[in-house]
Amino acid sequence: MTVVHEGHGGADERMLAAMFDGAASPVALADERDGAHALAIGLAASESFPAGEPVTLPGGKRD
C-alpha cells in the first residue's frame, strides 16, 4: 500500500474513493455508529480538558 503524507495521511482521498467510486478499501470502513462513538469521545474530551477531570461515557456493547 502506498502511504501518502498529506492531510490525514491520505485517508481522505482513499475514504472518498471507497465510498463513491467503489474502490476496494484495505480496511473496513466506519459506519454511522462508529461516527457517533467518535463524536461522543470528542465531546467528552472537550468537556474534560477545561475541567481537568475525566468524563465517563455511557457503556454499551457493540453488536
Image (spheres, rainbow, N blue to C red):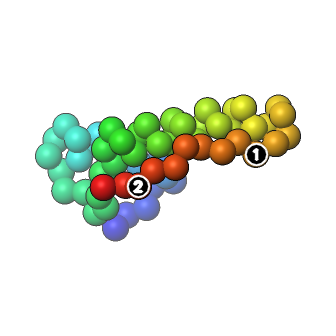
In the orientation shown, which residue stands out farthest toward the bottom?
A: 1
Q: Can residue 6 be seen in this view?
A: no
In the rendered image, the quadrant that contains the N terminus is: bottom left
Label 1: which secondary element: loop
Q: Are marks 2 and 1 in contact (CB under 8 Å)?
A: no
Picture residue at 52% right of the left edge, 49% below the top: 59
**Residue 6: x, y in percent?**
50, 47
First in sequence, mark 2 or 1: give its number. Answer: 1
Q: Which of marks 2 and 1 is in front?
A: 2
Quadrant of the rendered structure where residue 50 is? top right
Q: Which amino acid does label 2 sit on?
A: Lys
Q: Is residue 2 above or below residue 9?
A: below
Disc 2 and disc 1: Cα gap in Å? 21 Å
In the figure, residue 28 lies in which quadrant?
bottom left
The label number, if any, that marks residue 54 in the structure image: 1
Neighbour class for label 1 at 10 Å: few (<14), some, many (≥20)? Answer: few
Image coordinates for residue 58, horizontal then vertical, percent: 55, 43
Q: Where is residue 15 in the image (x, y as percent from the top left)?
A: 32, 45
The three-letter amino acid code for the residue at tag 1 is Pro
**At 23% across and 41% down in the image, what residue appears?**
19
Q: What is the x, y in percent for residue 20?
A: 19, 37
Q: Residue at x 30, y 51 (%)?
A: 29
Residue 52 appears left or right of 48 = right
The mark found on residue 61 in the picture is 2
